[in-house]
C-alpha cells in the first residue's frame, strides 16, 4: 500500500495564507461556471486552514467554549471560474478589535482576480454570546495581523 501525503492546508507568503483549490464538475452550474454559493465554501476553507496552519483548530476551540460566527461578508465577483481551474484562496487577517476579526480574502486564477471578500467574524461562546479571543489565540494571530 502506498502512503499518501496529508491534504495540504496551504502555505504562507508574508502575512498572506494561500490555499490551492481545484474546481470540479460538482462545483459548477449547468454552464460549467462555478456556482456563486461555492465561493463561500472556498473562503471558509481559506479562513479555517489559516487557523490550522498557525496552530488553532476548530475542534480545540470547542473544548474552550469558543467558536466564530460571521457578522458581515461582502463579495465582489470579478471573473468566472470554471471546471478544472486551479485557484488560490488568499487570506489575510487584518485586525482584531474586541471580539471582532477583520479578514480580507481573494480568489485568483494565475494573475486573474476571480473574487474578493471583506469579512467580519465575531468570536463567540458555544451558546452564541460574544467573547474576546483568548490570550493564546491573540498571541498566535499577532504575527499575522497588520500592525496597528
Image (cartoon, rainbow, N blue to C red):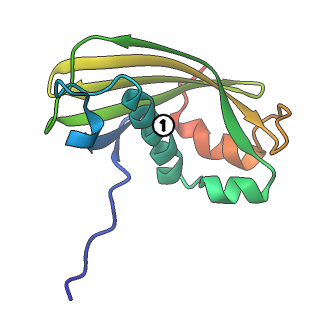
Q: Quadrant of the N terminus?
A: bottom left
Q: Is residue 53 above or below residue 141?
A: below
> Where, by quadrant of the figure, is residue 116 drawn?
top left
On the rendered structure, is 123 left or right of 113? Answer: right
Q: Nearer the viewer, residue 132 or 126?
A: 126
Q: 98 above or below 85?
A: above
Where is residue 139 shown, x and y percent of the image?
Answer: 66, 44
Q: Residue at x 43, y 39 (%)?
A: 46
- The quadrant the C terminus occupies is top right
Residue at the image point whose x is 26% and y is 19% from the top: 114
Q: Residue furthest bottom?
A: 1
Q: How many marks?
A: 1
Viewer-side residue, 28 vs 137: 28
Q: Position of residue 105 (x, y in %)?
A: 42, 25
Label 1: few (<14), some (14–19) or many (≥20) C-alpha neighbours in 10 Å: some
Image coordinates of residue 134 in percent, x first then y, are 77, 44
Is residue 24 visible in the rendered image? The answer is no
Instruction: Name the secondary structure under disc 1.
Output: helix
Residue under numbered circle 1:
44
Residue 104 appears in the figure: yes
What residue is shown at x 32% (from left), y 26% (from top)? 35
Task: Using residue 35 as the reference point, say whether residue 101 is left or right of it.
Answer: right
In the visual, does 113 lie left or right of 12? left
In the image, 45 versus 93, the foreground residue is 45
| Residue occupying the point 68% across, 37% down | 68
Amino acid at each position: 500500500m502506498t502512503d499518501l501525503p496529508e491534504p495540504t492546508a496551504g502555505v504562507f507568503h508574508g502575512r498572506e495564507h494561500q490555499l490551492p483549490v481545484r474546481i470540479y464538475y460538482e462545483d459548477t452550474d449547468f454552464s460549467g461556471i462555478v456556482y456563486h454559493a461555492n465561493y463561500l465554501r472556498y473562503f471558509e476553507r481559506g479562513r479555517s486552514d489559516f487557523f490550522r496552519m498557525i496552530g488553532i483548530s476548530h475542534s480545540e476551540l470547542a473544548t474552550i467554549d469558543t467558536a466564530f460566527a460571521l457578522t458581515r461578508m461582502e463579495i465582489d465577483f470579478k471573473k468566472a471560474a470554471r471546471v478544472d481551474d486551479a485557484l488560490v484562496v488568499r487570506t489575510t487577517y487584518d485586525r482584531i478589535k474586541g471580539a471582532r476579526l477583520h479578514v480580507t480574502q481573494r480568489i485568483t486564477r494565475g494573475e486573474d482576480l476571480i473574487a474578493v471578500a471583506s469579512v467580519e467574524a465575531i468570536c463567540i461562546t458555544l451558546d452564541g454570546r460574544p467573547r474576546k479571543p483568548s490570550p493564546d489565540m491573540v498571541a498566535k494571530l499577532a504575527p499575522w495581523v497588520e500592525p496597528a
